[in-house]
Amino acid sequence: MNQGDVVKSHALIRLMQLVSPALPVGSYAYSTGLEQAVDLRWVHNEATTGQWIEGVFQHSLGRLDLPILKRLYDAQVRGDPDGVLRWSDFLFASRESAELQLEDEQLGAALARLACDLNIAGGAKWRHRDGVPLATVFSLVCHQWEIPLMEAALGYGWMWCENQVAAAIKLIPLGQTSGQRILGALAEELPGWVEVALELGDDDIGAVLPGMVIASGMHETQYCRLFRS
């Protein structure tokens, strides 16, 4: 194995570490509105779970989080702290409910603490700042660990999909095999979705997903719940 292959393999292993469910950031505690969608019976079986996750990805992550992740990553590479801060604030301000903002802020804060504990350069800057989205710190860690942008975006998207499927398995409930079928279908589509997301221009960035936002707002007063969003 030549030196270039070693570097690529190391970056891949680091990416697997970063998107692993074992990463101690607490993502398992959030459903991003899915719990309310299940309570309303919008999502109630394998087919509707796949449709919900696909729809949220294409119209939210693919239109907002991933295009901004690209800009955050590029700003990290350029050494442009103003650019990082501008896009970080834009992403946080785009969260349309209190729960969605709190989820993103708490996941970002948890990853910032971990980055400090792992001695990742630049992590301390975000540790005590309010309103820092997960994508901001994720882009920093990917840059420091020399994970290429496309792989970073695929990992970010896969991490979100996997968490959504895990939540659905608990909530509906779905069997583990159903969950794996959904993940298999998502894996087929994910590269194309990510490629489109990374090609969006600045004026095309923005999520339009009123159903998820309504579900998120209603979840704040849901009578009985397992998840924080």
Image: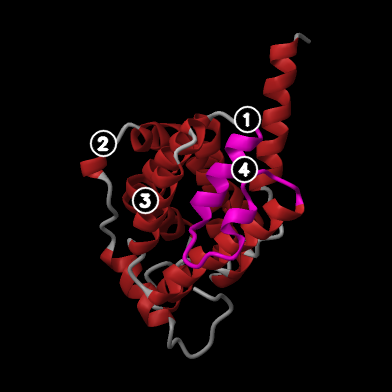
> Which of the labelled discs sits on residue 86, or is there none?
3
Q: Secondary structure at mark 2?
A: loop
- Point out the frontmost of discs 3 and 2: 3
Looking at the rendering, which quadrant does residue 178 occupy? bottom right
Locate residue 172, reporting x and y percent: 53, 70
Q: Secondary structure at mark 1?
A: loop
Whether the residues at callouts 4 and 2 have beta carbons within 8 Å, the answer is no
Amino acid type of disc 2? Gly
Looking at the rendering, which quadrant does residue 174 occupy? bottom right
- Give the magenta range: 118-146
Q: Secondary structure at mark 3?
A: helix
The answer, for residue 90, to whether it is visible in the render is yes
Residue at image mark 4: 141
Looking at the rendering, which quadrant does residue 202 occupy? top left
Whether the residues at callouts 3 and 1 have beta carbons within 8 Å, the answer is no
Whether the residues at callouts 4 and 3 have beta carbons within 8 Å, the answer is no
The answer, for residue 33, to whether it is visible in the render is no
Q: Nearer the viewer, residue 33 or 71?
A: 71
Residue depicted at x 21% and y 43%: 203
Of the residues under marks 2 and 1, which one precedes in the sequence? 1
Of the residues under marks 4 and 2, which one precedes in the sequence? 4
Say above or below: 24 vs 224: above
Residue at image mark 2: 201
Q: Nearer the viewer, residue 82 or 227?
A: 82
Of the residues under marks 3 and 2, which one precedes in the sequence? 3
Mark 2 and mark 1: span between their CA atoms?
25 Å
Q: Secondary structure at mark 4?
A: helix
Q: Residues within 10 Å of mark 4 (few under 14, many from 20)?
A: many
Residue at image mark 1: 146
Locate residue 128, reporting x and y percent: 59, 65
